[in-house]
Amino acid sequence: MIASGNRAVSYAKAIYEMPVVKVGDLIGISVKEAIGLGFHRIVIALLPGKAVKLAAGLMNTHSSIGDARIEAITWAAVMAEINGELLRSIAASKTVGEALHYLGDAAGRVMRVIPRGR
């Protein structure tokens, strides 16, 4: 299992009984290295902000590389059939946390779209 940071490592260790390697923002390189080492199954532990960046195709999730968090969560909300004023609020959010707050009970449904990419 790879994790992006200290909090993701802590959450992963609390849920799974397997070694966790902290890789920081270099998710894409870490996955490629793991595949190169012969791993066939890779679990990635991320907090929501990093997860939506990864879903948007950013393999390096550092803020200096790029950011598509709000666009990705807005897209996921559309795919989860969120519409109207709620969708406009999500699109205007400054953070993933703010968008998830607006989503309320629908947040889980939207976040489940993220890893599937559809």
Image (cartoon, rainbow, N blue to C red):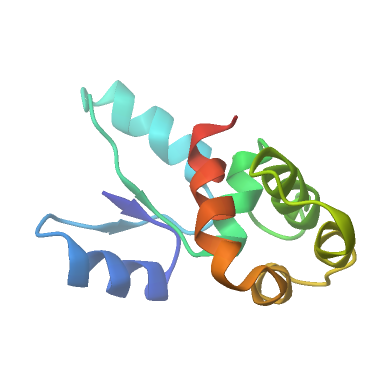
Question: Quick one: which residue is furthest to the left in this view?
Answer: 17
Name the residue nearer the viewer: 82 or 74.
82
Does 52 sit left or right of 68 as displayed?
Answer: left
Does 36 sit left or right of 79 as displayed?
Answer: left
Residue 21 vs 114, above or below: the answer is: below
Residue 89 vs 113, above or below: the answer is: below
Q: Position of residue 67 (x, y in %)?
A: 78, 53
Does 7 sit left or right of 57 as displayed?
Answer: left
Name the residue nearer the viewer: 117 or 2.
117
**Do we see residue 92 in this rendering?**
yes
Q: Quadrant of residue 95?
A: bottom right
Which residue is at a point 72% across and 69% down the rendered structure image?
99
Which residue is at a point 73% across and 51% down the rendered structure image?
82
Which residue is at a point 29% across and 37% down the rendered structure image?
42
Name the residue nearer the viewer: 102 or 48.
102
Q: Position of residue 71 (x, y in %)?
A: 80, 49
Name the residue nearer the viewer: 117 or 46.
117
Which residue is at a point 81% across and 64% down the rendered structure image?
86
Q: Position of residue 41 (x, y in %)?
A: 24, 31
